[in-house]
Amino acid sequence: MRILVAVAEVAVVDGEFDIEGQTVPDRFLRHECNEWDQYALAEAVRIANEVADVEVVTVTIGPERAEETIDRALAAGADRAIRIWDDALAAKDLLDPATKADLIARVAREEGPDLVLAGAQSAGEGFGATGVTLAERLGFEWAAAVDDLDLNADAGVAHVRRELEDGVRELTDVRLPAVLTVQTGITELPTGVPDTGEARDGDRAVLNLDDLGLRVAVDGHFEQQSLTVPEAERETTLFEGAPAETAAELAAVLCEAGVDR
Amino acid sequence: MTVLAVAEHRRGELRDVSFELITAGRELAREIGGDLRVAVVNGPVEDYARTLSREAVDVVHTVDHGAEFNHDVYVQAVAELTEAVDPTVLLLPHTADGMDYAPAVASRLGRPLLTDAVDLAFDDRLAVTRERYGATAEATIEVNADRAAVTLRPTEWPPAEYRGDARIEPFAVDVDEAAVQSNVNGYEEVRGDVDLEGAGVVVAVGRGVGAEEDLDPIFELADALDAVVGAARPVIDAGWLGPERQVGTAGTTVDPEVYLALGISGAPRHVAGVKGAETVVAVNEDPAAPIFDVADYGVVGDLFEVVPALLAQFR
Ligand SMILES: Cc1cc2nc3c(=O)[nH]c(=O)nc-3n(C[C@H](O)[C@H](O)[C@H](O)COP(=O)(O)OP(=O)(O)OC[C@H]3O[C@@H](n4cnc5c(N)ncnc54)[C@H](O)[C@@H]3O)c2cc1C
């Protein structure tokens, strides 16, 4: 059995930042493996450890920098990694889920997985749509926001629990092959995975749009008009200084707001 | 020109987001200069349709098939109805179920899809405002197409309240049962004996707390403030606290007098569960953390210094 896992590297902002033109410049960004995808990979590796003959293959759309994330994925137990990159993609600041799904679908058709795992969303853009779009493109079944998975490969079915709102979970059976988008917490993340794993060169491939036989109009429908810092919903009073001082100020505020001292 | 909004319901009740979609749809229909239609699929659709007949809704389309959400049915029903009605904009909820069918509908119809919108505008083209870079920045994105689909973030629009006189039109979908390859067997609920909903003061911890052992001072502080301890999701995922303590869309919605957020970034799914709090106080070492945008008071600093100092104030 083969499990394909979509593993993205995301850019997150830490600390103060500026917006220049319509982007947050690289110097304010930290790149890391998308948290939801880390769980998707950990779940795939868990299955591989429990079921015989499972190959875990990751697919990443990203520039060379994303090899760091791929190092981690290989160190965490993936058997092979495929990275998709191209100048046409590099020219884009924002890739829409449909484009990503088209690219991954090409790899999936080649690889013929029984199961595809992807994160429920990415920490950077939070579209939350790539996995289900991919399923539709492939003609696979799917389930979104899965927080528990019991795979019965022989019966060709995935018993999943989907996380809905307000503490409610849905129990659903999904026919294989399927794409499942994974919620954080679905399994335990491995500890002690080195930041940069042993480079296992033989296990990686890099494909461009030509290799994929794609001449897609990359992300043709979205045109970003502006990028701004969102307006604060509440007016915030910030306390600065030594902890003892700020704590005294906070305590006063808490008492005024109804906490008994 | 038409706006079509798809309602959501669960276990016999229309969800709030349905009425929020109507408000957003009404504003959009006005800008587009068209009518507003609402669709409801599965369940007691006639009853739902009457409730969904709010001010400015012209038509409610009902698809009577099955009791509860099943994405294979939704995809067929919503895609067919969308083809028949041909709305300029299709509005869907950005909920767990919305995430489970909206991308498939958009893909099937070849419509561009923008998700998790917090604002909409229409001037010749649809412009959607949504967050980027993990909610730290907000982008307005114009859709370069005549037809689009958008999912809306819950709680961003006020729910439509006033009754209207919409026409109720059943829409027959010949559901292809062979294409229904997923089967919902039931529901489970996370319940515990932690009364977050009734709490007057909530002390909530996020990933910033770092380790299970470091929760002790948090519980001491909660004790001193007569507060209930809540948590952001990573704390639950790591198993440091039970799921009954999760605050947010997937967890519990709280409305305390005081919400004290310690080491929580302020991700939208968390913040959505805190909107009813009277006073929000945040301690975070990152001055750009989005939590400060929804807080009344904040300290930029290390919670492991602030918490003991605060505890000393209440002893
Ligand atoms: C479908 C769906 C549903 C979800 N539902 C929920 C939900 O119900 N509830 C929920 O919480 N999340 C939910 N999430 C997850 C949500 O998107 C975020 O991932 C989560 O809320 C982040 O939690 P956090 O703020 O603790 O972690 P982070 O975003 O990692 O933030 C940690 C913060 O702690 C600060 N920090 C670190 N160390 C310290 C220190 N020593 N002192 C002070 N500050 C420090 C950092 O600056 C940072 O801002 C959901 C996601 C999805 C996709």
Image (cartoon, rainbow, N blue to C red):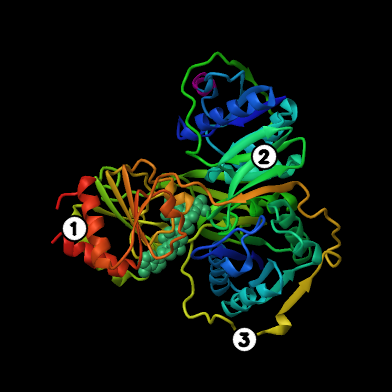
Determine the image quadrant of residue B76: top right
Label 2 is found on which chain of the structure? B
Tell whether circle 3 marks a residue whose Cβ is less than 8 angstroms from ligand 1: no
Find residue A47 and report its horizontal and vertical position in percent.
Answer: 56, 69
Q: Amino acid at mark 1?
A: Asp
Q: Residue furthest bottom?
A: A198
Q: Residue furthest front?
A: A241
Q: Which residue is mark 3?
A: A198
Instruction: Mark 3 vs mark 1: tell me if same chain.
Output: no
In the picture, measured across the screen, residue B209 lies left or right of residue A142, that is left
Q: Quadrant of ligand 1?
A: bottom left
Q: Is residue B131 above or below residue B127?
A: below
Q: Amino acid at mark 3?
A: Glu
In the picture, measured across the screen, residue A127 lies left or right of residue B125, that is left
Secondary structure type for disc 2: strand
Label 3 is found on which chain of the structure? A
- Kindly check if marks 3 and 1 are in contact, taking CB atoms under 8 A apart as contact: no
Q: Which residue is mark 1?
A: B223
The secondary structure that dominates the magenta segment is: helix
The magenta-colored residue range is B46-51
Q: CA distance from mark 2 to mark 3?
A: 46 Å
Crowd rating for badge 2 (residues with CA inside 10 Å; few <14, some 14–19, many 20+): many
Q: CA distance from mark 1 to mark 2?
A: 48 Å
Q: Amino acid at mark 2?
A: Ala
Label 1 is found on which chain of the structure? B
Determine the image quadrant of residue B305: bottom left
Which numbered tag is attached to residue B127?
2
